[in-house]
Image (cartoon, rainbow, N blue to C red):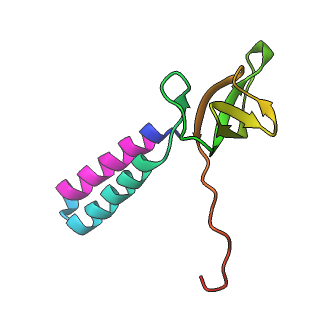
Amino acid sequence: MKKEMVIDKLEELCDQIQRVEHDQMEANGVQRAIDAINKIESWVSILDGLPDKNMPVYATLEYHGGERRVEEAYYKDGEFLRGWSSLNHIIKAWQPRYIPEPYSERG
């Protein structure tokens, strides 16, 4: 299900909760879910913008024949890289790839 469809369904649910059940606390919870989904990163065309320098990304790559795949890459010094290979000639879009903090026993 696409992000837009999920948001539409949640907005309908939020509206119903407010109109029918009059439960503002529950409606606020649904609204928080909508806000969280809206914050989820989406693809950015390379024509619309580039990542910050030295940033790990997911890249949509288009190969010969039009096949598209998502692969991990790194944006550094104006180039999208996989290892030492430049992907600039086949990249179509990117999105941030967040690297989590290392595990700690302290939580």
Q: Residue at x 62, y 48 (%)?
A: 97
The rendered magenta stretch, by its main secondary structure, is classed as helix
Tally the marks. 0
Query: With respect to residue 104, does 78 lie above or below?
Result: above
Whole-percent x, y for residue 50 in the image: 53, 32
Considering the image in quadrants, where does the C terminus appear?
bottom right
The spot of residue 37 in percent (x, y) is 43, 50
What is the x, y in percent for residue 54?
Answer: 62, 44
Seen as rendered, the residue at the extreme top is 65
Q: Which quadrant holds residue 21? A: bottom left
Depth check, front residue: 15 or 38:
38
Please tell me whether residue 14 belongs to the stretch shown in magenta. Answer: yes
Q: Is residue 30 left or right of residue 70?
A: left
Specify whether residue 93 is painted magenta. Answer: no
Taking 96 as reference, is 84 left or right?
Answer: right
Which residues, given as a range, are shown in magenta?
Answer: 5-19
67 and 27: which is toward the camera:
67
Residue at the far front: name it. Answer: 77
Q: Position of residue 51 (x, y in %)?
A: 55, 37
Residue 11 appears left or right of 41: left
At a point 27% along the width and 62% down the height, the residue shown is 28
* Residue 66 sits above or below residue 19 on the image: above
Q: Residue at x 73, y 38 (%)?
A: 71
> Dividing the picture into quarters, in which one does residue 59 lie?
top right
- Taking 35 as reference, is 17 left or right? left
